[in-house]
Image (spheres, rainbow, N blue to C red):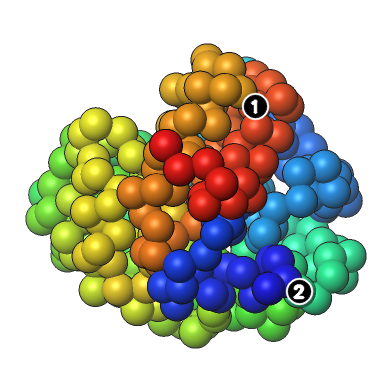
Amino acid sequence: MTRYRDLLSAALQGESLAITPVAVWRHYPERDQDSDSLAEATLADQARFDGDLVKLTPASTWQSRDQGLVDEWAGDAIGRRAIVSRPVQVPTDWLRLKQLDPWRGFSARILHSVERVRRALPGDIPLLATVFNPIFQAVQLAGFDTLRNHAHAHQPELTQGLDTLLRNTLSVIGALADLGVDGIFLATQHAGRSALAPEPYGSLALPADRACLEAAPLPFNILHLHGPDLHWEPFVDLTSAIIHYDATPENPEPAMLASRVARGLATGPHPAGTLLHGDPQTLRADIMALRQRLFGRRFFLAPGCALPLAVREAQIMAMMRAAREPLSASAP
């Protein structure tokens, strides 16, 4: 079997494979503010690590900048930007959110970066683009406390604002599909009980999540559930997306979750665990044990979130080698 698209497709069909599809991704601080720099960094990492898919990872604020959000680079450990100024302060600010053209303003830089990466990659390497769901954008624009207050006391205004954000997100997804991506990486950071409980998440966010994933029926859509103590049950029936999450002690054990999800599962070593603080031998042992537990499941290996900026290249290479080591030759 060839690698990349064929290998990933076979894994998601539940074939018992001797090797496991694998991909890594990370943020590129400051380089994520420019189309060419982001594309060059993405392509350089693919050339170095040879993942079975490529994920373009722009700054998490990329869909909110054109609504008036102001951010800056402040040294975050995984490369996220800090928000300096939020445009939503009072309930009526939700009504002022703009219907955006994705090919104008800051978002156009990211689309141009996608365009360049897709043009440079061989056709058999799938390309995914990161998109943040409407509730994530709403939290960026207002702040979490303000959003919760408006959800309780000013729901009509918030609902209209979320509708605007959904329309903009669907426009972005349409533009990405037109550029030839093989999937979107839809990130939600609030599907956890420490953020939003199953309700109000179910009414405020879940319908929009599903609409985003169904807007472009692409073969390798991924839904990223971020953080601990996830309420994952509403997502297991999704046939439109692979579920990606952090396999921490507060979250489901991967083999259990893999047996429940409809499309497939992506997870791997937690970025702050052996990937960052271990050595290649310990990391290999962790990955081989995970692969054994998930053998024959619809699974591919990926970091639990974005790679920390401080992760050593030797650790990334150890992760890639461990995914490609035949299980029959190294069963624990």
Q: CA distance from mark 2 to mark 1?
A: 26 Å
Q: Residues within 10 Å of mark 2 (few under 14, many from 20)?
A: few
Residue in the image at 72% along x and 71% along y: 2
- Indicate the quadrant containing the N terminus: top left, top right, bottom left or bottom right: bottom right
Report the disc number at residue 315.
1
Q: Please give the label number shown on residue 172.
A: none
In-front residue for pair 178/259: 259
**Percent of width and height locating residue 148:** 20, 43
Task: Give the amino acid type for the residue marked by disc 1 in the picture.
Answer: Gln
* Looking at the image, residue 174 lies above or below residue 154: below
Q: Position of residue 290 (x, y in %)?
A: 40, 43
Mark identifier at residue 124? 2
User: In the rendered structure, which disc, 2 or 1, sits on the residue that comes first in sequence?
Assistant: 2
Q: Give residue 41's position: percent from left, percent from top.
A: 82, 43
Residue 53's place in the image compared with 145, above or below, is below
Give residue 313's quadrant in the image: top right
Kind of residue at badge 2: Asp
Q: Which residue, as the protein is rendered here, is positioned at the far front?
A: 329
Q: Residue at x 66, y 41 (%)?
A: 321
- Marks 2/1 in contact by CB < 8 Å: the verdict is no
To which quarter of the image does residue 61 belong?
top right
User: Which residue is found at the position 27% from the left and 36% from the top?
Assistant: 228
In front here: 282 or 158?
282
Label 1 Cα crowd, 10 Å radius (few <14 / some 14-19 / many 20+)? many
Asked if residue 63 can be seen in this view, the reply is: no
As drawn, is 244 to the left or to the right of 313?
Answer: left
